[in-house]
Amino acid sequence: MADKIAVLPGDGVGKDVTEAAMKVLDAVGFKAEYTYGDIGWEFWCNEGDPLPERTIELLKNSKCALFGAITSKPKDEAAEELKPELRDKGFVYQSPIVRLRQLFNLHTNLRPCKAYPGNPLNYRDDIDLVVFRENTEGLYVGVEYYPLPQEVYDALAKYNSKMERFGKSSLEDIAVSCRIFTRAGCQNIARQGFEYAKKFGYKTVTFVEKPNVIRETSGLMIREARKIAKEYPGIEIWETNIDAQCMWLVKNPQDYGVMVATNMFGDIVSDLAAQLIGGLGFSPSGNIGDNFAVFEPTHGSAPKYEGQYKVNPIAMILTSKMMLQWLGEIEMADRIDKAIATVLKEGNVKTYDFGGTHTTMEMADAIIEKL
């Protein structure tokens, strides 16, 4: 029986690259029961919800989801774009992908960054690393206050004298975002990194945090990572600060294989790693939970290019490859990977981001030809 897979093209070029990836999936022989779902800016503007309940129900009845890209804007700008009859009705914009990660406990964000020889945008051809990013906690959890309620200020001031320096400011002038870690969340992402290193033969796992300054949250992550490391005696644990790691990653990217970070730092270091292998047009990702996963490219929706079939679909095609791996279709995934490698090595088909004029679908067709 074919797997039920939700397809969420989303906004802008998400629709274009999803179309390209679906064509490659069909060509490689993957059989599934696809159902398309609604997500993104159109549904925020017209319904006040970028992740409608019908889409959540669709996902609950699916094996996994393939997701394109969405447009996302700050809260105040989003409110201005609601259709007039929905304004002042209490609707508050929330990122639908962040909601998906939390609703389905997609605790692990997996971002492979592999350089394919022949790509003129590669920093080096020997880069092959993967970032494990904790996906449901940290600074992106959404516990934020503006203006700061008096009772929240009082509670913080009661337990931490450092709040005194803000006592002269009006509460209307203070915004607070909470960075929340749990021991279980830290242990889980650390173990995911070590298990991957063990499975694929990496000798080190690098933890990217900032415990010298953010002592309690980053400190908890590093302490738990050290405990988990003792379970993997053949793998060395490296500990780096996020600022220094960005420098070292540019200087010596080949030194790193598995990198583990919490939510915001993982977001930062994975985008840097993506640029080293040609940019976000080559960078896939998977949001993975215990029994469900959502696969998405790491690039945005680029609304100005929607429908022009201009953008590079390789990140989305690699994302579909990750989905196949997760589903156990290893042979199909390998064929897609080798086809992409061949197209890039030959260098005859290039989209605009790496110096060519070929379209999204022409790149997909070139990959299909090499399958």
Image (spheres, helix red, strand yellow):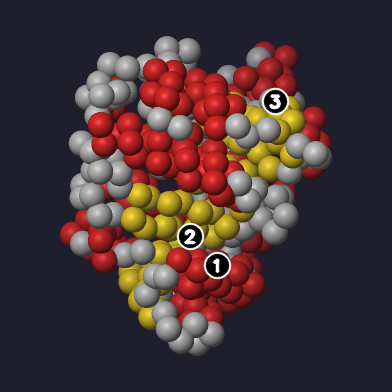
Res 36 label: 3
- Above or below, comparing residue 341 to residue 163 in the picture: above
Q: Is residue 82 visible in this depiction of the protein?
A: no
Amino acid type of the residue that numbered disc 1 sits on in the rendered structure? Gln
CA gap, disc 2 and disc 3: 28 Å
Residue 356, percent across and down?
25, 21
Amino acid type of the residue that numbered disc 2 sits on in the rendered structure? Phe
Q: Quadrant of the N terminus?
A: top right
> How dense is the environment of label 1, judged by Cα within 10 Å: few (below 14), some, or many (20 and up)?
some
Quadrant in which residue 29 is drawn? top right
Residue 183, percent across and down?
61, 75
Q: Could you say which is closer to the camera, residue 274 or residue 347?
A: 347
Residue 192, percent across and down?
55, 67
CA gap, disc 1 and disc 3: 31 Å
* Callout 1–callout 2 Cβ contact below 8 Å: yes
Is residue 257 rendered to the left or right of residue 94?
left
Query: Which residue is drawn at the image coordinates 48% and 45% (left, top)?
Result: 334
Per the image, label 2 sits on a secondary structure element best described as strand
Query: Which residue is drawn at the image coordinates 43% and 21% (left, top)?
Result: 365
Res 132 label: 2
Amino acid type of the residue that numbered disc 3 sits on in the rendered structure? Tyr
CA gap, disc 1 and disc 2: 8 Å
Q: Could you say which is closer to the camera, residue 218 or residue 117?
A: 117
> How dense is the environment of label 2, judged by Cα within 10 Å: few (below 14), some, or many (20 and up)?
many
> How dense is the environment of label 3, judged by Cα within 10 Å: few (below 14), some, or many (20 and up)?
some
Residue behind mark 1 = 192
Q: Is residue 155 visible in this depiction of the protein?
A: yes
